[in-house]
Image (spheres, rainbow, N blue to C red):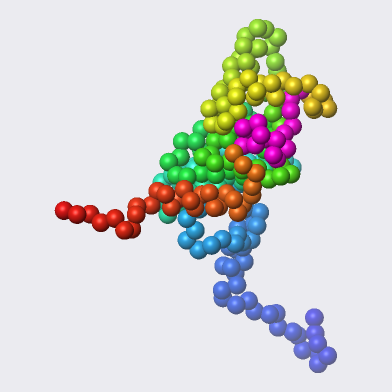
Amino acid sequence: MTDLNNQPQQPQKEQPGDQPKKSELVEKIQQLGQSNVAQAPDSNIHVLPIIGQVEGHMQLPPQNKTTKYEHLIPQLVAIEQNPKIEGLIVLLNTVGGDVEAGLAISEMIASLSKPTASIVLGGGHSIGVPIAVSTNHSFITETATMTIHPIRMTGLVIGVPQTFEYMDKMQDRVVNFVTQHSNIDEDKFKELMFAKGNLTRDIGTNVVGQDAVDYGLIDAVGGVKEAMEKLNEEIDKRKPDEDEQVIQ
């Protein structure tokens, strides 16, 4: 292409530092789906989002928004080992997913030695319920919902009594974990799980905001502010008193 003086235009040269910046940006978008994450420098609280569907041993279709448990478990181990991280906030907006993967994540969070808090935003359904109650303190926003229902099985199901016994034992694992890590009674939780008429095409109960607190499932109604205040309070309690002096 030529200009008005019939002289060829020279292509614009890239600056030496442009190419590495572009490649880093593309790599971040490919890995994280975003270009940059705004965060406070040297923050002592780690935020762990659990969104979409909890993916277990079977890989879900690419159009599904998923949280892969093989990504979360190494993160939780790293959080426990990192001395700079003093607390963890779990953000939940999930429809549920794989039972064993959800229980594995719940057990990992419950076994952390550092203060933890969860916030149910939008929804914490199905296996999201054990994850929500696995932290030291749990919060739910006023408009968020939690669906409590029996477990399901997909794929080939063998019509023998052993299949029912297996499902019953797996369901007991969920019930026991939730009742041990929250204030809800086992009978009440099972009543909500097997309730009829609350869900259009299913059995179970959909609890909203304050209802989850009234049942004893969640500790309090709140969002990011309340969770951060509670977490910082717990972190301050664990710090040694600066006024204390060692007398020999």
Residue placed at 47% from the left, 55% from the top?
A: 44
Q: Residue furthest top?
A: 161
Point out residue 122 in the picture as x, y percentages from the top left corner: 71, 44
In-front residue for pair 15/114: 114
Taking the magenta stretch, the answer to whether it contains residue 205 is: yes
Q: Is residue 211 above or below residue 227?
A: above
Point out residue 42 in the picture as x, y percentages from the top left corner: 47, 61
**Image quadrant in which the N terminus is located:** bottom right
Q: Is residue 57 above or below residue 92?
A: above
Count of numbered circles on the image: 0
Determine whether, in the image, residue 118 is placed left or right of residue 108. right
Taking the magenta stretch, the answer to whether it contains residue 93 is: no
Determine whether, in the image, residue 150 is placed left or right of residue 175. right
Q: Quadrant of residue 104?
A: top right
Q: Is residue 91 above or below residue 29?
A: above
Residue placed at 60% from the left, 59% from the top?
A: 37
Point out residue 94 in the picture as x, y percentages from the top left corner: 68, 39
Please report the bounds of the magenta region as a residue range: 203-218
Q: Quadrant of residue 68?
A: top right
In-front residue for pair 43/145: 145
Q: Residue furthest left?
A: 248
In-front residue for pair 190/245: 245
Residue placed at 64% from the left, 49% from the top?
A: 223
Point out residue 146 in the picture as x, y percentages from the top left corner: 70, 35
Residue placed at 79% from the left, 27% from the top?
A: 198
> Quick check: can you spot residue 239?
yes
> Quick check: can you spot residue 101?
no
